Image (cartoon, rainbow, N blue to C red):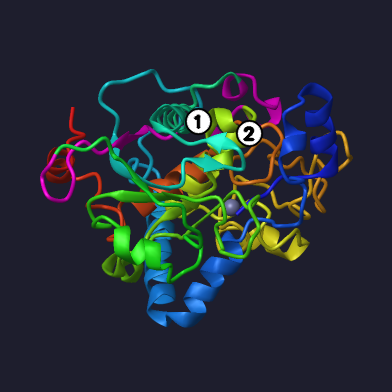
Amino acid sequence: MISKLSLSILAALMATSGAVEAKQPEFAANHCKAAETNAQHYRNFPAALTEAKARHAKLKNANQAQAKPGSGDLVSDGTTPDALAITDNPTFIIPVVFHVYGTVQNGDTVNDAVIIDALNKTNEDFQGRTADFADIDPEFENVKDALNIEFRLASIDPNGNPTSGIIYHPESSGAGNYSSSDVKRDHWDNYKYMNVYIQNDLYADGVTNNSGVAWYPDSGMSDEGLARVAYNGAYLGTNTDENFRSVLTHEFGHFLDLIHTFEGGCKRGFERRCAITGDENCDTPQQNSWQMNPGDGGILNCMGQTINWQNFMAYSDQYANFTQDQVDRMQNGLNSGARVTLWSASNLAATGVAN
Ligand SMILES: [Zn+2]
């Protein structure tokens, strides 16, 4: 999805770290491919688009009901913008399996420790337990939100045997391509496990600085074993800088139905139709484009509004937050047919991640 953002960020990195020169230039224009990838999916499979529309209609109806006085809170489990307390009993627990293809990617090591650390930090991002979340741009203090979710490595495999939840395979490429043979062969039941594929060359095109790609919930993909996040091991946790490792969080956001905040650009006419245009969330201001580095004058959109430049679904040099509408949308996604079985009590027991 994303590759490195801009020359200015690279320059900043080079000023503070000697580590980047060993890698390919990270500002190559290999931008996030989630938008194109999912649009292509809807063109190829009209049933997937129908399913997505039904899912989003459900969210819209719930929001309208929520807006009526006395209707109660039908969607969100609370809109308090505070960080979530560390809890042993999150609302959503998701069993995850990592499939790793090659333990050295762009010269970086991919092992259990790196993956466990990366997953822990993504959980902290979702739960709002980071310093950046606490110290966010004040304009978004009342909009930021956290999701009480925890992604846990599976400890029971599909055959009922113990597992670390991290499976190593020979080096390979192309897990970001829709019909990847690795994905078809190696996936675990998509209704029981969230499958994450770690490869260095995501599209088997010789480019090793694409960071990741993911598909929105779709039961057709889950039926075929194709639901996934595909991610570059060179950008896992401590293999990259503290900001860029949150691109894993960004990909998990896509997996839970989030669209880029810069989708569709900025148009005045879209403001009143914010629920069905752009990223389909009304509390994330439109963005002129994916380029929006604070300090470069790009922080205001075509309406003169401050954009949520720290949003996990943007390309940010300081990732910090989701918004309340995004959290509602992720909860709606979690309740869709393609995701709802993942966190059922019976499945948490079957995959060994129950409390
Ligand atoms: Zn993306």
Q: Is residue 226 among what the camera can see?
A: no
What residue is at 77 percent from the left and 61 percent from the top? 268
The C terminus - image quarter = top left
**Residue carrying label 1:** 125
Residue 292 location (% of width, % of height): 79, 44
Q: Which residues are magenta?
A: 132-161
Q: Is residue 34 among what the camera can see?
A: yes
What is the count of numbered marks? 2
Q: Residues within 10 Å of mark 2 (few under 14, many from 20)?
A: many
Above or below, 86 relative to 333: above
Magenta stretch contains residue 140: yes
Q: Secondary structure at mark 2?
A: loop
Residue 24 location (% of width, % of height): 73, 46
Residue 205 location (% of width, % of height): 62, 65
The three-letter code of the residue at mark 2 reads: Tyr
* Farthest-out residue, front: 170
What residue is at 58 percent from the left and 25 percent from the top? 133
The three-letter code of the residue at mark 1 reads: Asp
Name which of mark 1 and mark 2 comes first in the sequence.
Answer: 1
**Residue carrying label 2:** 319
**Do labels 1 and 2 touch, CB within 8 Å?**
yes
Question: Within the image, what quadrant is residue 317 found in?
Answer: top right
